[in-house]
Image: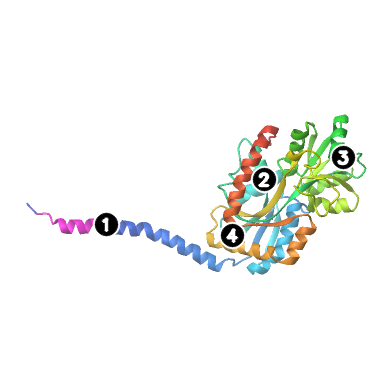
Amino acid sequence: MRSINFKNSALLSSGRRILAVALIAVPVLGLLFTEQALGQTWPAKPIKLIVGFPPGGGIDIVARNLQPGLQEALGQSVIIEYKPGAGGVLAASELSRTTADGYTLLVANIGPFILASNMMSKRPFDSTKDFSWISQTSGSGFVAVVPANHPANNLAEFVAWAKANADKANYASGGSGSITHLNGELLNQITGLRLVHVPYKGSAPAVQDLIGGQTQLLVDVASVLLPHIQSGKLKAIYVTDSQRQPQLPNVATAREAGYPGLETSGWQGIVGPAGIPKEIVNKIAKAVQATLARPEVRQRFAQTGSNVMERGPEEFNAFIASEINRWVPVIKASGAKLD
């Protein structure tokens, strides 16, 4: 009978284990080296910055504020591309399926990622899993406006008018599932009104019909509404910030008007598809931070009623989770659906 050399057998077994570990480690190390190499060479071509709404809206303004600084910080052209539709959901859905190489990004806001997607029985994406949340850029409360010739001059007067004119009391929005839609639904919930929702394909057409008197109310970002308020075409009746806006010092907050439940704020930021290498995510976040630090950029945001609000990747991810927890109960209570 042949004897077994246990020492050699043990060595053979140990060698097999080492080989197995090596076979596992090589692909992992290769992936790490590939990500580092990508991060070092990126960007090697122009970057596409998607706006999921028509030109002229608040998201477009954010994109244009960021574009020059990002081009300088990254050393590549940043091309703004418009893909409006379904309250921003169309662009967000396409983004979730895009190659995660950092060359396709989107200016995000609350509408498609927190609101609209949670109004659908079959969600088109998972906001916490299907995206790389790179950097928040800005945020602000909202302004409620009515046509210049509307009889209401403040929130209390509008509520009284709407109750007395239920047959023509409505509100416009930049699209079903947008924050302008939910701000109107929230107004209905808090005040007991039954304003009829009139959706548009973006804020710009919603504003034009409001000016023309086809609708009676819009609650949107100051960047969209301030020029029309200042020109006298629209009249502000309340703001949703916790404090009065510097550009509208005579317009009361919702809390001051006796409706603290109407306090809301919007936000904007840069997002990409899930799986962008960490090296590239950090490069984009640093470029955004460098852009937001420029005095002229901060001034442009301030002029449009927005505040620069910087959150890096980790903070932005946590913030998105908190926004979902806040707004989903409002959506469910409203019964708003997009199917």
**Quadrant where the C terminus is found in the figure:** top right
Tell whether position 9 is magenta: yes
Q: Residue at x 70, y 41 (%)?
A: 177
Q: Along the horizontal axis of the image, is 25 left or right of 263?
A: left
Is residue 102 shown above or below 211? below
- Real-space CA distance between mark 3 and mark 1, rounded to the nearest whole angstrom: 77 Å
Tell me if label 3 and label 2 are in contact, CB under 8 Å. no
Q: Secondary structure at mark 3?
A: loop
Mark 3 and mark 2 lie on one chain; the one further toward the N terminus is 2
Image coordinates for residue 39, horizontal then vertical, percent: 54, 65
User: Residue 202's spot in the image, x, y percent?
Assistant: 77, 47
Identify which amino acid the numbered label 2 is placed on. Pro
Neighbourhood count class around disc 3 (C-alpha, 10 Å): few under 14, some 14–19, many 20 upward: some
- Magenta stretch, residue numbers: 3-14
Q: Which residue is mark 1?
A: 16
First-in-chain label (2 vs 1): 1
Q: Gap between marks 2 and 4, in whole Å?
A: 20 Å
Q: Residue at x 18, y 56 (%)?
A: 9
- Kindly identify which residue carries mark 4: 102
Residue under pointer 2: 112
For residue 53, above or below residue 121: below
